[in-house]
Amino acid sequence: MPTRPSFSAADDPWIDVRTAHRYETVGLRELLLRAHEFDDLALPVPPAASALLRILVVICARTTGLDDPDLPASQWNALRREHLAAGRFDATAVHTYIDAHEWDAFHPHRPWMQDPLLAAQCPIPVSVNKLTYGRPAGNNLAWFSPHTDTDPKPLPVKEALWHLLIHHSYGAFGGCTPRTTPAGTAVRSTAGPLRGTASYHPLGRTLHETLLVGIPKFTGDEQNHADLCPWEEPKTPDPDAPPHPVTWPGRLLTGRSRHALLLVPDEDGTHVTDAYLTWATQHPRLPATDPYLAIHTNAKLPVERRRTPRLADISRAWWRDLEALVLAPDETAAIRRPEVFDTLNDLPAELRRALRVRVHGFDQDSSKVIDNGWYSATTPPVWTWAQDRDPRLAQRIADCCHAAEALAAALAKTANQAWKDATTPRAPDRPARPARPATTRSTWAHHALAAYWPLAETTFWRLLDDYHQSARAAFAGNAIHALHRAASTTALHHRQARRALHDATTALRRAGREPATDTTRPR
């Protein structure tokens, strides 16, 4: 009698980790038992690493007692310091937790992070290409991939689990495979809770430190409902039932998926050959603030749309987000740093000085099913720059970030107008029309901004050591240099272009002296 396929997320290797220049692949159990030996995760897919970090943080909280919402802040911080001082996770606690739950990705009744009901409630699977980010599926063209829907290649299970986590966190909205439940049939899903966002994770010297410092503190008044992760639920969730309240930390970090998936393995359980992918619930999402997201607040919008997370931008350098990390929480500020950073001042001084930040972003179109790309970045140790530690430096960072963005907006606007003036003939006695906001960027604007940001980064770091120089004036010089680089060839041969470039240079010098009137943030 043949055995059924099996792959344990707890004990079979699927998570890449790094120690110096040495790489290994481990399961959840070994990762936790040896977290003090590993420097960092090494998953090559940033959104999968971001989703996995949330899962690992919850398991870390479960095995250390740091998931107790009734602990006063002082006791919670003291307990975390004790676990940091221990230098490793308690093996007995790790084994006890892992052994208490089902982790088999192909279990017939409780497959890990999946819904076994889909085999009966969906008419057909969607193909492994639809599961795998980066592969073409359906009518999409295979620009950079050899995969086709006529001959889908099986996916190794470890990679299938990465993409499973991505769909739970960053899944698309819109039309999907029909799913028929007792309440009826629906064919549309809503976006995953992290879709299109950038996450900011505190990064310690070891994975053990990273998980402990990454646990967000409970900030509510009380918690009256059981806090369960998907793998801790006593039974398969009912897709027609209202969603559970968003409790801390399990449901907040792992239980807000809008998508349901079911992997189809090959005979020996080493590859995934197909998958079901559809909606998990048709109920409206419950309000919740992810502790790893920077939050923008626009007081002019209705209350339900006033707070929005900072979106990922694949063309955006990480230093432009430093303002969102170093400024302390302020109810009047337009941006609030991720909540996970609010408890870092209670860490041991040596660890605080070493803390870096890992940025994981997935640039996705918010109105279409389009994925522009993902990225990851690691900052130097930045917590000593925070407003809680060095208010003067934090404010200088914020001022420089604002000035850099303001001059970028001025450069985009000015370059568009200069391009229009250079390419649109007009009578000598007719004055130029005032600039209007452009819906698309001109050639000069594209090239100028591409040249501006590398120059601005160099200027930014220099300004942090020079409090006397005007940040606006310095970035205006970068903008002028970038515009001349973008337009010099055309201006060399056309008199009208030279005049347009001269007028644009004058406008940028003026922008370096005056407060910005255009607060548009360019992408």
Image (spheres, rainbow, N blue to C red):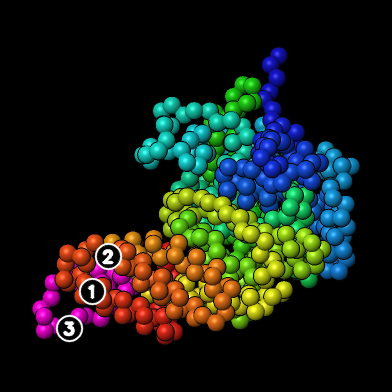
Nearer-the-camera pick, 178 or 311: 311
Residue under pointer 3: 431
Give percent across and percent down for residue 413: 33, 73
Q: Magenta includes 68?
A: no
Which element carries disc 2, helix, strand or loop? Answer: helix
For the point 17% across and 72% down, the residue is 496
Are the two marked residues, 1 and 2, in contact with CB atoms closer than 8 angstroms?
Answer: yes
501 left or right of 357 in image: left
Residue under pointer 1: 500
Q: Earlier in the sequence, mark 1 or mark 2?
A: 2
**Which amino acid type is marked by label 1?**
Ala
Give percent across and percent down for residue 513: 42, 84
Instruction: For marks 1 and 2, give the CA distance.
Output: 10 Å
Span of residues in magenta: 413-438
Give percent across and percent down for residue 158: 63, 34
For the point 44% across and 70% down, the residue is 521
132 left or right of 78 in image: left
